[in-house]
Image (tube, rainbow, N blue to C red):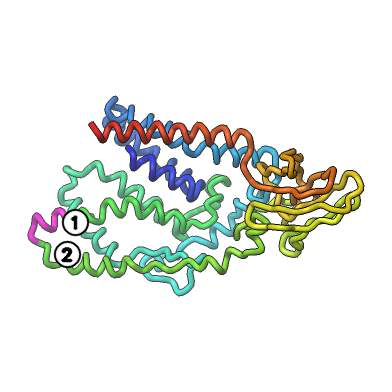
Amino acid sequence: YLFFIIGYVGLLFSHLVLSMFLSLLLLPALIIYRKQVFQITCLKPLIIAILVVSILVLPDLILLLEHRLTGAYLVFQDHVMTSLGLVEAETIPLFHFIAKNANYDWVVAYFIPMTTIILFLCSTYYLYRHRKEHQHLCYFYCLTILTLWMTSSIFPWHLMPKVTWMIQFPWRLMTIAILPIAVLAPCCLLYGTRNHHLPWLVPTIIISLFTGIQGRRYHLDRYYLPGNANQALGHQTEYLPVLAQTNYMTREKHIIVLAGTATAEVLQNHGDQLQFTIQDTLGHVTIELPKLYYKGYLLTDEEGNHYPLTMSTSGYLETTIMHEGIYTLRYQGTGMYLFLRVIRLLVIISGSIYFLIKVGR
């Protein structure tokens, strides 16, 4: 179950909503294959794998929950991540399942190569002829049909619960659809070799290898701007604080004095780190830093003293400085996040040791 852990953790970290859809779609499999799943030899490793996956992703999920409960961000606002109009606009017309579109959103090509479809249909033919031996594959066909339907323009998204609209782009479900297709399509190779149909399968496989290498380079420079990075923000503006949505594009990258008198100069500004000086101050001075507000930032002076940070009326970090000097801001995460990271590290170390010992035996 090592591959299960690696795969599921990778999916959760790459796309949380998509992993939620996959988890829901896998639940029927537990019922269909209950005789195999709920045997002690299978159930015990499954429970351990689920616990390990939960521990590995828990720090980041808790950090997300902390922002959900204590901060106001666009991603949690109505009609930002749950827009029916966007969902319906980003479905796939039926013809585009097999024909490459000329212009894909986000430069993501979402279609099924013709050779894959041919192999899938051939496998369906062979599996149907031997259906008594392969009844266990019915679930994979149901999953294929359902996910392809959900990505298509004929799926009734308006009847679905609002939380499902968080998928935003139904073509993302092609990631799930291709999993059962990848299981079913090669089945024809097994029966093709048994029935001496290999000569026509070989060119099909060769063509599929060439057509499968149709990836497009993701033009990161189009979407990830250095200016955004210096505010600790990537391209995804939906993660902005609500208060910052109207000013983050026009705000300068300097420090703004909100109350009191001081001269502030930025020494270094990169990603989630900032170093600056405060001079010519008379007593307490309240400043706004050129970093969007997210919980987990740490501000210290040259002596290591910590300064509390709050969200300004513009959605940026705000703090009160008491004396001149050099200050350093860096992101480390919340206390709960750091604690759970230690637990995760211990699990990774102990799991690695156990795996090495088991392999050594």
Residue at left offset 36%, top offset 67%: 98
Helix, strand or loop at label 2? It is helix
Report x, y in % for residue 143: 36, 48
**Residue to which mark 1 is pinned:** 188
Left or right: 306, with 127 as reference point: right
Asked if 207 appears above or below 272 in the picture, the reply is below
Residue at left offset 25%, top offset 56%: 185
Extreme residue in the bottom direction: 102
Q: What residue type is labelled 2?
A: Leu
Q: Marks 2 and 1, Cα distance to the nearest angstrom?
A: 9 Å
Q: Quadrant of residue 163?
A: top right
Asked if 283 appears above or below 214 in the picture, the reply is above
Report x, y in % for residue 230: 66, 59
Q: What residue type is labelled 1?
A: Cys
Residue at left offset 30%, top offset 31%: 37
State which region is magenta.
Answer: 189-196
Asked if marks 2 and 1 touch (Cβ < 8 Å), the reply is: yes
Report x, y in % for residue 337: 58, 36
| The N terminus lies in quadrant | top left
